[in-house]
Image: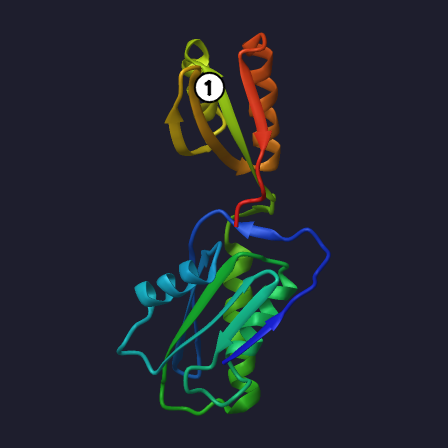
Amino acid sequence: MSVAQSGDEKVPLVLTGEATLQIEVKKSRFIAHASPASCPGEAMSFLERVRDPGATHNCWAYRICPAYRFSDDGEPAGTAGRPMLSAIERRNIDQVMVIVTRFFGGIKLGAGGLARAYGGVTSACLQQASTRPFEHEKQVEVSATFSLTGNAYNLLQKYALERHDERYDERGVVFLAKGPQRLIDDFVHDLVELSSGGVHITEHPKPS
């Protein structure tokens, strides 16, 4: 198991949903499961959900920049987790967890064979997965008069943004809106256009 830092400057891709792919190599079955993971906790929860206790190995790797982590889960060191991570990096995928479950078929593959199998099934799984460009998230505090509450909620729904920490004061409603930067900017633009001065927007620190 290893932990390290990554400094890839390219804009990465992220998965839009889970993906699964299976290959067979010399009677051993390798089943890759990939999922979006915005934090290590989500990655490990996915591992607990899909790992097969009856399998020979459940190897895994995640990349959630700037951190990444991987495990060979009993395979010879460097033959599973590292090749999986390398496949993730070659595909330039971020915020992703991949688990490869192996059922041993009775024929040893050797270190090179294992690395090719684990890296290959990871790469193939990510290749057929649905992806989109990564977008940094942004968070703003919205203070709107009671008369604008309905407009604000409708725009939140239109742009599929999250709403947090809602409260009311003598003026109206106050809440945090969170989502991809581009959508937050469009939401703010539209709300200000409708407001005639009845809304106040304050940018908050980036969501953790």
Percent from the top left, x then y, of residue 89? Answer: 63, 65
In the foreground, 168 or 1 = 168
Instruction: Name the residue beneath numbered marker 1.
Output: 152
Q: Residues within 10 Å of mark 1 (few under 14, many from 20)?
A: many
Residue at coordinates 34% horizontally, 83% vertically from top-left? 56
SS of the residue at dot 1? helix
Residue at the extreme front of the image, as rendered: 170
Q: Nearer the viewer, residue 126 or 140?
A: 140
Q: Residue at 44% of width from left, 92% of height from top?
A: 108
Q: Is residue 28 above or below residue 86?
A: below
Picture quarter containing residue 75?
bottom left
Is 56 displayed left or right of 110 in the figure? Answer: left
Quarter of the image for residue 32 reads bottom left
Left or right: residue 57 compared with residue 161: left
In this picture, residue 189 sits left or right of residue 103: right
Q: Eyeballing the image, is 106 above or below 191?
A: below
Question: What residue is shown at x 55% (from left), y 24% (from top)?
Answer: 187
- Count the marks: 1
